[in-house]
Image (cartoon, helix red, strand yellow):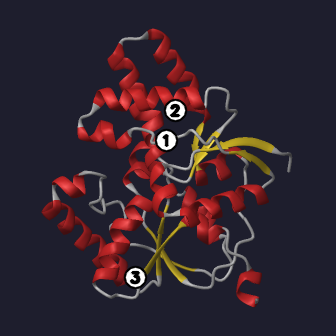
């Protein structure tokens, strides 16, 4: 496979709370002969600010991100949420400014931004990563992966190729987990009710692990499962796809 140059957008959430998801992302991409650059001055994509009503601040963060990745060939992030912001939120924000040059800049940026699993399947044309993960797993498709990026079954196609995995379908999988960034903080009762429904469906699968393309949702789900002492864990999909037979043989 020829080498592909990409820039990794780590996301502030992963960088702060889930570095192992980033390490797994890099491992998988390097195994696929990707040359990765990491731009140290990258920060938040601005999604939280836009969703909370801080449009001015969101525009500033958008402009910063556009400048940092202006010369990037491709941008890949292990987060459907952040890539969804870049594709949908950035265009909205740019149009709100009525700045034609900014709109053009965003329109040029959007086709370069990919979610991790989407990049592997759509750009690299790979579905079998040689992964091995001998555990029962259920997959939660996050709202941004379903409704903004419309990833469909792309993550599931990758999971189905993992050796040893017992992939169990999640009931009402298209229902939101209730996180929604600051939604869970501002509307805790509604968020908790939604989380309770999601946890019930996860537990009904009997799976050991719940996986997804967004660690933000997994933090919400995992926090609830841990508080109930269910014994069910959460893991970003990159960490499953990075797992190999020798990891269990050692």
Which secondary structure, mark 2? helix
Earlier in the chain: of badge 2 and badge 1, it is 1
Element carrying mark 3: helix
Q: In the picture, residue 54 is in which quadrant?
A: top left
Residue that mark 2 sits on: 65
Q: CA distance from mark 3 to mark 2?
A: 40 Å
Q: Badge 1: few (under 14), some or many (20 or more) residues near its Cα, within 10 Å?
A: some
Query: Taking 37 as reference, is 230 above or below it?
Result: below
Question: Residue, x 30% and y 70% (percent of image)?
Answer: 198
The answer for how far apart the CA atoms under marks 1 and 3 are is 37 Å
Q: In the drawing, does residue 166 fall left or right of residue 103? A: right
Q: Nearer the viewer, mark 1 or mark 3?
A: 1
Q: Residue at x 30, y 63 (%)?
A: 177
Q: Quadrant of residue 74?
A: top right
The numbered dot on residue 205 is 3
Cα distance in 3D space between marks 2 and 1: 7 Å
Q: Residues within 10 Å of mark 3 (few under 14, many from 20)?
A: some
Q: Nearer the viewer, mark 2 or mark 1?
A: 1
Residue drawn at the location 70% of the way across and 72% of the way down? 131
Label 2 packing within 10 angstroms: few (<14), some (14-19), many (20+) = some
Q: Is residue 212 above or below residue 152?
A: below
Please give the label number shown on residue 143: none
Q: Height in image: 156 above or below 146?
A: below
Classify residue 227 as left or right of residue 222: left
Q: Write down the residue under mark 1.
A: 43
């Amino acid at each position: 496979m020829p080498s592909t140059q990409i820039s990794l957008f780590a996301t502030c959430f992963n960088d702060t709370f889930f570095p192992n998801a980033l390490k797994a992302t890099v491992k998988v991409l390097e195994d696929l002969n990707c040359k990765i650059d990491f731009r140290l001055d990258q920060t938040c994509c601005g999604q939280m600010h836009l969703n909370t009503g801080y449009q001015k601040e969101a525009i500033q963060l958008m402009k910063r991100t556009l400048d940092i990745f202006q010369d990037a060939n491709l941008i890949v992030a292990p987060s459907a949420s952040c890539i969804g912001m870049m594709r949908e939120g950035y265009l909205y924000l740019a149009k709100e400014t009525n700045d034609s040059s900014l709109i053009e800049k965003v329109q040029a940026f959007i086709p370069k931004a990919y979610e991790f699993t989407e990049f592997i399947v759509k750009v690299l044309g790979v579905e079998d990563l040689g992964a091995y993960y001998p555990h029962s797993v259920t997959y939660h498709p996050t709202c941004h992966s379903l409704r903004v990026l419309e990833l469909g079954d792309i993550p599931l196609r990758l999971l189905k190729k993992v050796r040893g995995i017992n992939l169990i379908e999640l009931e009402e999988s298209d229902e939101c987990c209730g996180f929604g960034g600051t939604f869970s903080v501002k509307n805790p009762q509604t968020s908790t009710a939604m989380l309770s429904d999601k946890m019930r469906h996860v537990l009904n699968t009997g799976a050991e692990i719940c996986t997804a393309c967004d660690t933000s949702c997994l933090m919400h789900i995992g926090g609830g499962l841990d508080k109930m002492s269910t014994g069910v864990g959460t893991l970003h999909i990159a960490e499953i796809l990075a797992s190999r037979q020798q990891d269990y043989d050692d």
